[in-house]
Every structure is written in structure tokens, then in C-alpha cells.
Image (cartoon, grey):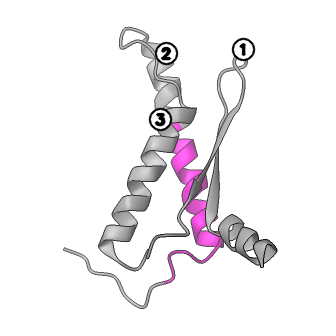
């Protein structure tokens, strides 16, 4: 029973990895969405908030005066979100019968 629950939790989790500059270490965090209904707006918004929080944890923000550092930080955030969305898509998390465009 525990094994099945662990497999389900692992299947409903994402691993976010941020590749930092060469001198720094790689950072990783896991975001679970097992408790969310991604077909609902509230579930999708909650997952987005979790992803953004995790991305902030793995992509360290530099001083606002560090122009190069801020460019690297933005790239880190973009890459982390891109990888998370690829994982979600590969796991079929976004399979919905329809979407609404407003």
C-alpha cells in the first residue's frame, strides 16, 4: 500500500533544476501537485504559485545593480519553468477536453 502511494506521489511531482553559473552549485527542488485538480482554474493557479515559489528557491536573485547577474537570473527562471512545463506535459497533466480563451 505504501509503495503504491509513493509511486503516485512521485508521478505527481516535478523536479525543478536550476543550473547556476559555473562557480555556483546546481540547485534542485521537487514540487508536488498530487493534491490538485489541474482541470480547475484554482488547481492550475495553485500549481503555478507553487512553481514560481520553487523557481525563486532554486534561482537566486542577484542585486538589482548586477545587470549580468539579472540576465542570468531571468534565464534561470525561464529555463526552470520551461523544464517544469515539459515534465507536466510528459506526464499528461494538461490533458483537458477543452480550454477557454478570453
Point 53% across, 64% down: residue:
33
The residue under label 1 is: 23
Residue 82: percent from left, percent from top: 55, 52
Point 43% across, 76% down: residue:
37
* CA separation in Å, label 3 and label 1: 19 Å
Q: Please, which residue is most extreme toward the front here?
A: 1
Indicate the quadrant where residue 48 lies: bottom left
Point 77% across, 72% down: residue:
2
9 to 67, vertically: above or below? below
Front tag of 1 and 2? 1
Q: Quadrant of the N terminus?
A: bottom right
Tell me if mark 1 has few (under 14), some (14-19) or many (20+) residues whose alpha carbon lies within 10 angstroms of its own.
few
Q: Please, which residue is most extreme toward the bottom here?
A: 97
The residue under label 2 is: 68
The residue under label 3 is: 56
* CA separation in Å, label 1 and label 2: 15 Å
* Kind of element beneath mark 3: helix
Residue 81: percent from left, percent from top: 52, 49
**82 falls in the magenta region:** yes
Say if mark 2 contacts mark 3, CB within 8 Å: no
Task: Give the mark count.
Answer: 3
N-term-proximal mark, 2 vs 3:
3
* CA separation in Å, label 2 and label 3: 18 Å
The stretch of residues the image draws in magenta is 77-95
Q: Please, which residue is most extreme toward the left here?
A: 102
The numbered mark at residue 83 is none
Amino acid at each position: 500500500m505504501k509503495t503504491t502511494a509513493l509511486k503516485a506521489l512521485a508521478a505527481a511531482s516535478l523536479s525543478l533544476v536550476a543550473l547556476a553559473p559555473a562557480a555556483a552549485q546546481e540547485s534542485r527542488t521537487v514540487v508536488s501537485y498530487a493534491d490538485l485538480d489541474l482541470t480547475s482554474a484554482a488547481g492550475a493557479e495553485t500549481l503555478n504559485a507553487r512553481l514560481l515559489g520553487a523557481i525563486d528557491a532554486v534561482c537566486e536573485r542577484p542585486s538589482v545593480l548586477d545587470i549580468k547577474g539579472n540576465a542570468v537570473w531571468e534565464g534561470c527562471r525561464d529555463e526552470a519553468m520551461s523544464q517544469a512545463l515539459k515534465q507536466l506535459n510528459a506526464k499528461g497533466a494538461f490533458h483537458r477536453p477543452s480550454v477557454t480563451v478570453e
